[in-house]
């Protein structure tokens, strides 16, 4: 199945933040999201010296599938809820999809 109309928003936030970020993305039009647990690998000095945070590498990674025309609105909601404009709060980026499978409920919406 072609996936040209969909993109994935990948968001990495502090542990305990993902549920609120997913809720905000849904309010902005996302259908849902997948939360994964992860761990940062930056040296402890980066957390303390650069970011001013206690060393806590535990992260939550959110994968959000979004229609291309909704990406900016959803990304804005994610950024606001996750406070991504503040140092050390997280990061979000968008990845284009080449193909997609397993999302049969989307088949009817694809051209």
Image (spheres, rainbow, N blue to C red):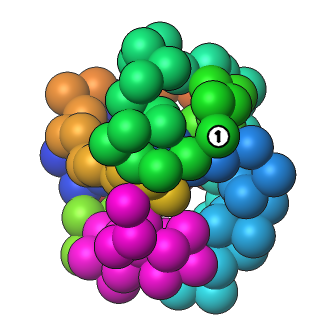
Residue drawn at 36 percent across, 80 percent down? 76
Judging depth in this view, the residue of 67 and 85 nearest the camera is: 85
Residue ID for mark 1: 54
Would residue 89 appear left or right of 102 to someone viewing this image? Answer: left
Find the residue positioned furthest to the front: 49
Q: Is 26 above or below relative to 31?
A: below
Judging depth in this view, the residue of 53 and 33 nearest the camera is: 53
Q: Is 83 above or below relative to 60?
A: below
Residue drawn at 56 percent across, 47 percent down? 53
Q: Secondary structure at mark 1?
A: loop
Count of residue discs: 1
The image position of residue 10, as x and y in percent, is 42, 43
Quadrant position of the N terminus in the picture: top left
Q: Residues within 10 Å of mark 1 (few under 14, many from 20)?
A: few
Would residue 28 appear left or right of 49 to someone viewing this image? Answer: right
Judging depth in this view, the residue of 4 and 39 nearest the camera is: 39
On the question of residue 29 being in view, the answer is no
Q: Is 76 above or below relative to 38?
A: below
Taking the magenta stretch, the answer to whether it contains residue 81 is: yes
On the question of residue 21 being in view, the answer is yes
Residue drawn at 64 percent across, 47 percent down? 14
Residue drawn at 68 percent across, 31 percent down? 56
The image position of residue 8, as x and y in percent, is 37, 45
Q: Which residues are magenta?
A: 70-87
Quadrant position of the C terminus in the picture: bottom left
Magenta part, dominant SS: helix
The image position of residue 100, as x and y in percent, is 39, 29
Would residue 12 appear left or right of 3 to someone viewing this image? Answer: right
Q: Is 89 above or below relative to 80?
A: above
Taking the magenta stretch, the answer to whether it contains residue 62 is: no
The image position of residue 50, as x and y in percent, is 33, 42
């Amino acid at each position: 199945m072609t996936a040209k109309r969909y993109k994935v928003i990948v968001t990495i936030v502090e542990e305990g933040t993902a549920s609120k970020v997913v809720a905000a993305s849904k309010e902005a039009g996302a259908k849902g999201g997948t939360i994964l647990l992860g761990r940062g690998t930056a040296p402890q000095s980066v957390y303390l010296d650069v970011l001013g945070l206690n060393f806590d590498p535990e992260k939550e990674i959110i994968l959000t599938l979004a229609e291309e025309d909704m990406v900016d609105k959803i990304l804005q909601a994610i950024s606001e809820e996750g406070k991504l404009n503040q140092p050390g709060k997280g990061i979000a980026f968008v990845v284009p999809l080449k193909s997609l499978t397993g999302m049969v409920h989307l088949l009817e919406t694809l051209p």
